[in-house]
Image (cartoon, rainbow, N blue to C red):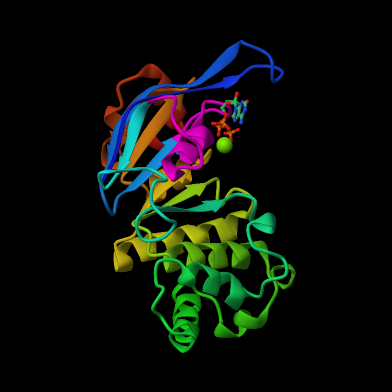
Amino acid sequence: MLIVDRVDKSYRKGGFFSRERQQVLKNISFHYEQGECLGIIGESGCGKSTLGRLLLGIEKPESGSILLKGKKAGGNRAGSGSISAVFQDYTSSINPYFTVEQAIMESLGIGRDRSSRRDNHAKVDRLLKHVGLDPHCRTKYPHELSGGQIQRVCIARAVATEAPCILLDEAISSLDSSVQMQVLELLKRLKEIDKLGYIFITHDIQAAAFICDRIMIMRNGQIEEIVSTTQLMDVQSPYAKKMLQMVIS
Ligand SMILES: Nc1ncnc2c1ncn2[C@@H]1O[C@H](COP(=O)(O)OP(=O)(O)OP(=O)(O)O)[C@@H](O)[C@H]1O
Ligand SMILES: [Mg+2]
């Protein structure tokens, strides 16, 4: 479904007039199948979020290509043809002047032009229940919700767009551990029920091992290794082995 082929990305180092560039992604190639959960792990600064932005089409690769269902990533309107995202900083991911209902409605508008408002109203109710939120939350503003509840709203919004895949960049990192577990359980449930696929960028190797089908280990802007979660013991590279130590020992 998603084919990433020999992607490179660099940024200008220093000021605007500086000629020196920092190579952030080097020769990244991988396939992603619909419905799978692919984890991306690696040390801080290795290029995970940059790769995420390229997959979302927010930024363009310098060379190489990213094809989502045969089309260039970001070439589609937001909605059913592209990847939805949930980020770490939930405090700024929802417009503070929007109620939960308005925030979700905004996503429902995308890609479903013909739906009537009343239909959308019922859909918001269903979505809230689907992500484990009480429908009474619909009238609340973000500051009236907990971090875990806001992340659930963000997930509901991503689900509402009917995107074939949701990219989560450190989406559970700011939540406390019991809430992290609840959100992971929710993602797992949605994956089973809705056949929803994720690209799960995280520092948390245990969380990745819990929810992902495959894990990509990145190092200095390159793919070190991609390993199936059921075969973590067979990981080849010593670096990947070290990274995964916590979950394979
Ligand atoms: N817009 C930008 N302009 C210049 N340099 C950038 C830009 N975005 C990222 N970088 C650099 O690219 C490198 C990779 O950053 P990136 O945010 O992708 O890392 P990461 O793996 O997501 O790290 P973390 O785990 O800390 O979130 C870093 O050295 C960063 O400083
Ligand atoms: Mg990052």
**Left or right for 88, reference 209:** right
Q: Decide whether residue 62 is among the magenta residues.
A: yes
Q: Which residue, as the protein is rendered here, is positioned at the far bottom?
A: 118
Q: Residue at x 50, y 74 (%)?
A: 132
The image position of residue 209, as x and y in percent, is: 39, 44
Q: Quadrant of ligand 2?
A: top right
**Left or right for 89, reference 55:** right
**Left or right for 40, reference 194:** right
Residue 7, quarter of the rendered image: top left
How many labels were placed on the picture?
A: 0
Q: Residue 24 or 150: which is nearer the viewer?
A: 24
Q: Residue at x 64, y 62 (%)?
A: 94
The image position of residue 66, as x and y in percent, is: 34, 36
**Left or right for 138, reference 234:** right
Image quarter of the C terminus: top left
- The boundaries of the magenta stretch are 41-63
Q: Is residue 71 above or below residue 240?
A: below
Q: Is residue 49 above or below residue 164?
A: above
Q: Residue at x 31, y 28 (%)?
A: 29
Residue 20, quarter of the rendered image: top right
- Residue 249 seen in render: no
Q: Residue 40 or 165: which is nearer the viewer?
A: 165
The image position of residue 236, as x and y in percent, is: 30, 21
- Residue 42 seen in render: yes
The image position of residue 74, as x and y in percent, is: 42, 45
Q: Residue 245 or 229: which is nearer the viewer?
A: 229
Q: Residue at x 62, y 80 (%)?
A: 137
